[in-house]
Amino acid sequence: MDLQQIEDLIRLMRKHRVGEIEYENADIKLAVRFHASGVAPTVVAAPVASAAPSPAAAPAAAPASAGRMVKSPMVGTFYRAAKPGSPPFASVGDRVSVGQPLCIIEAMKLMNELESDVTGVIEEILVENGQPVQFGQALFRVRAD
Amino acid sequence: MSSPALASPVRPSPALTAQVQALLAGPVPVSTPEARAALCATLRPLLDEGGVLDDQSGGVRLRLDAAWGALTLALRSGRPVEHHAETSSTNTRARALAAVLPAGAPLPLVVADHQTAGRGRLGRSWSAAPGAGLLFSLVLRPPVPPVEAPRCVLLWAAAMAEVLGLLLKWPNDLVDVEGRKVGGMLAELDGLGADRVPSVILGVGINIEPPTDPALTQAGSLRGLGRAPVDRAALLGALVRAVDRVDPLDPAGLDRWRARAHTLGRRVRVAGREGLATGLREDGALLVDGVPILAGDVELVAGEAGRGTE
């Protein structure tokens, strides 16, 4: 999928007033969402983990542990607490609900408090406090209810 | 302390705004004592905030240069205003307003004369004695995806530096030519990942008077530069209007930041790296020897007129 195709997709969504679309093939997973204000859409694209198609006997229902990944919406530095020394927003085993703050991503002194978009239990935190994170990088694995 | 359940921000009617503009611009004829009394009644809230109605040949004229309050600030800034004599943090208040602000609603300005728990980066405190600084937070909704929000903050910082005649220390500290910090800002993105319109909360603190806190003796102030405003509300209004005029989609926008950069061309230490600050990347990252830096405090390396400001 190239840039032109993504632009075409956004144009079609606007034309037909589609608010949100997700698309996935072997190479890419793409989500486009228009915000309620009708301003610019958010495009999130992530390469699909390049698990080579296993010959035969691909387990039908892979364990996958039903873990939903909460991903970083931007490049920056990952902080688990509001300030150094404060208790972290969330730890492994904690129950979190939609809208609950999970972490802060800082980029150029802009603090981004990332809220959970899923309700469930945190199974894994995939990034260390203070580490740089990439756009689309998985931060938390949450077992959704 | 401000009560948590506050009235909505003050917003003058278009009629009052037009009337005030006319009265600020020049003498407006008033035919009878009754008409003057009626005008005073209309303007009562502004006069209560320190506005003065002068009788001149040809009519009356309004002066707001000593006025300070929600209505004055709303007229000066063009935004709905919530004003606090004292609050814990203007950013906290602005976030609360943003969280319930519908799409398309006018974006509020929160102003405090005194902050008891002002926040800087990573929870550092930023406090000021009453009236010694300009302390305010803006709710902004730039029409860009969240990944481009950090760039917007640099654009807004550059617009304010132009109004104040100051320079910029990466990413958005307002400094004088010596590199002394006169103002700073803390931006927060609210609503990311949530099911509501994302907002940027831009908290700004500017020293009018030199800080009395002994830990901040390195800081600068508008007074110290001989530029303390006679009319604080007008200055705050000019800052807000400059921010609101910024076009986040202007591809050349960061040139305004570069034109006011104090950091560029100097040897710096940031994020564990030391080198020459060679440029500003289009997303707002600082290039140190060509390597993009996205977060961290910039320190000038000794010999570089290095007066730390943090």
Image: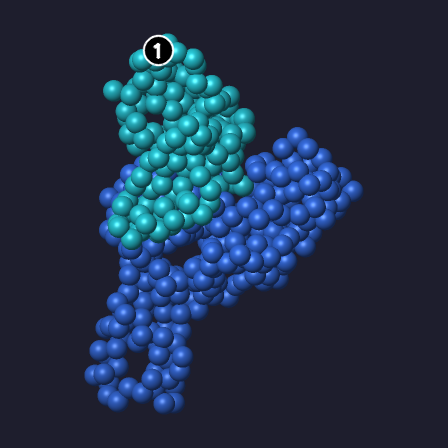
Chain colours: A cyan, B blue
Residue A1, image x, y percentages = 44, 39
Residue A141, image x, y percentages = 38, 20
Q: Quadrant of the C terminus of chain B?
A: top right
Going 45% across and 50% down the picture, which residue do you hit? B135
Going 45% across and 47% down the picture, which residue do you hit? A4
Give the class, few, some or many, for how many residues have Cα within 10 Å of label 1's Cα (few <14, many ≥20): few
Work out whether residue B132 can be spotted: no
Q: Specify whether B161 is left or right of A58.
A: right
Work out whether residue A39 can be spotted: yes
| Above or below for A105 versus A17 | above
Residue B152, image x, y percentages = 49, 50
Going 36% across and 75% down the picture, which residue do you hit? B21
In the image as oriented, which residue stretches furthest toward the right? B303
Q: Specify whether B229 is left or right of A36.
A: right
Q: Nearer the viewer, residue A36 or B73?
A: A36
Residue B171, image x, y percentages = 57, 45
Output the chain of dot 1: A
Amino acid at pointer 1: Pro
Q: Nearer the viewer, residue A134 or B12?
A: A134
Q: Quadrant of residue B213?
A: top right
Going 41% across and 37% down the picture, which residue do you hit? A44
Pointer 1: what residue? A59
Q: Secondary structure at mark 1?
A: loop
Total labels: the figure holds: 1
Q: Quadrant of residue A131?
A: top right
Q: Quadrant of residue B192?
A: top left
Q: Quadrant of the N terminus of chain B?
A: top left
